[in-house]
Amino acid sequence: MNLDDWKSQIKRGTLEFCILLMLKQRPSYGYEMITTLEQYPILTAKENTIYPLLRRLLKEGYISSSWQESTEGLPPRKYYSVTEKGLEYSSAMSEEWDHLLKAIDEIKGG
């Protein structure tokens, strides 16, 4: 396995968490989330990754969606929001993430 494969594995496991964290802050639409993730090269993801993930999170009840008309004459956008179930899930994920980082830090000798 090379470094790019390893980074891909890390990304796959954390995008769901990052999406929920972003939606916890405020509702957002898909392209906006993609643009936000692009600020962090290891988390950059394309539409063919994000939209299936959003559909799965919708299906599982972790997020909800609604269409909103644009005030600027643009087509309506589908906004996503985190649900109560999603908040509970992201809270549990956050706790596990903290445990993981602590364990890695200890293994590194930190």
Image (cartoon, rainbow, N blue to C red):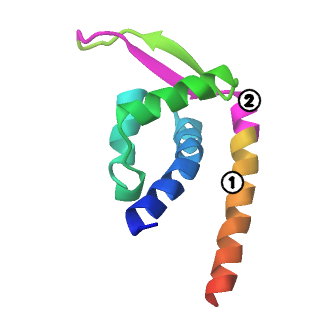
Which of the 4 image quarters holds residue 36?
top left
Q: Secondary structure under badge 2? A: helix
Mark 1 or mark 2, which has the lower sequence index?
2
Q: Secondary structure under badge 1? A: helix
What residue does disc 1 label?
A: 94
Is residue 51 located in the magenta-colored stretch of the structure? Answer: no
Task: Measuring from the top left, give residue 84's x and y in whole percent.
Answer: 73, 29
- Which segment is the magenta one? 73-88
In the rendered structure, find residue 57 and report the number of the disc placed on it. Answer: none
Is residue 84 located in the magenta-colored stretch of the structure? Answer: yes
Task: Measuring from the top left, give residue 2's x and y in whole percent.
Answer: 41, 68
24 is higher (above) or lower (below) than 13: above
Q: Amino acid at mark 2?
A: Glu
Left or right relative to 58: residue 92: right
Q: What residue is rendered at 54% in x and 46% in y?
A: 18
Q: Can you see residue 28? A: no
110 is higher (above) or lower (below) than 76: below
Q: What residue is rendered at 67% in x and 60% in y?
A: 97
The extreme front residue here reads: 1
Left or right relative to 6: residue 73: left
In the rendered structure, find residue 84 and report the number of the disc placed on it. Answer: 2
How far apart are labels 1 and 2 at the CA level?
15 Å
Q: What residue is rendered at 33% in x and 48% in y?
A: 38
For discs 1 and 2, the disc positioned in front in the rendered view: 1
Q: What residue is rendered at 59% in x and 46% in y?
A: 17
Depth check: give the residue in front, 49 or 27.
49
